[in-house]
Image: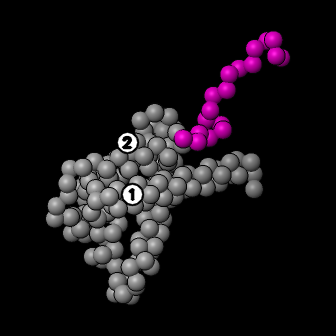
Amino acid sequence: MSRSQHSKTRDLVRAGARGLVGAMAMTGIRTLTGNVGLVEETPPEAIVGKHAPEPVQQLPVESRTALTAAAHWSFGAFAGLGYHVLPRKIRSLPWSGPAYGLIIWLGFEAVIAPLLAVRPTRRRLLGRLIIALDHAIYGIVVAGRLAPDPDAVKRPTPSRFWT
């Protein structure tokens, strides 16, 4: 494998890993906010609850919850790859990650939820804000703002004193 291919593979793995970690962070936020009653049902729970095949529906709650999380994490990893294929000029903008996360959420709300008929009958404003916030946090993670690529971090040029 050439150096260029190795670098591209490394970047794709990193993008997918960031998407995975971002989705895991969302799960943590939703677990906390759900346990204190701020979010009633998450979009992944609504999709699995309504559209999962019968064998999945028959699983014990803990297993179904784990399967739902794994599916969401897989989608998060895939969406991380999607962010990576955006032009570098866009990815370099500080707000691009949070905007990407919010666009994913808005796309779900505007297109996927109506198609799958999984829009909750009532969702409080605070719950919607929390879901928007966790998508923005997902975008921050996916953009690498918390752990930037070593190549993306600008290092000061050495002064003549040190050369």
User: Which is nearer the N-term, disc 1 or disc 2?
Assistant: 1
Structure colour scheme: one colour
Name the residue located 46 percent from the left edge and 33 percent from the top edge.
93
- The part of the image, by quadrant, that contains residue 147 is top right
Residue 151 screen position, x and y as percent: 65, 37
Split into 4 quadrants, where in the image is the C terminus?
top right
- Residue 64 is left or right of residue 85, and the answer is left
- Extent of the magenta region: 146-163
- The part of the image, by quadrant, that contains residue 35 is bottom left
Task: Name the element at disc 2.
Answer: helix
Name the residue located 44 percent from the left edge and 57 percent from the top edge.
28
Is 53 located above or below residue 141 in the figure?
below
Name the residue located 47 percent from the left edge and 69 percent from the top edge.
70
Q: What residue would you read off at disc 2?
A: 99
Task: Find out whether residue 151 is within the magenta segment.
Answer: yes
Work out whether residue 136 can be spotted: yes
Split into 4 quadrants, where in the image is the N terminus?
bottom right
Q: Specify the amino acid type for callout 2.
A: Ala
Q: Residues within 10 Å of mark 2 (few under 14, many from 20)?
A: some
| Residue nearest the viewer, comparing 85 with 117 | 117
Mark 1 vs 2: CB contact within 8 A = no
Task: Find out whether residue 159 is within the magenta segment.
Answer: yes
Residue 51 screen position, x and y as percent: 30, 77
Alpha carbon separation for disc pair 1 and 2: 23 Å
- Residue 95 is left or right of residue 126, and the answer is right
Of the two numbered discs 1 and 2 in the rendering, the one whose residue sits closer to the viewer: 1
Q: What residue would you read off at disc 1?
A: 32
- The part of the image, by quadrant, that contains residue 13 is bottom right
Residue 138 screen position, x and y as percent: 44, 49
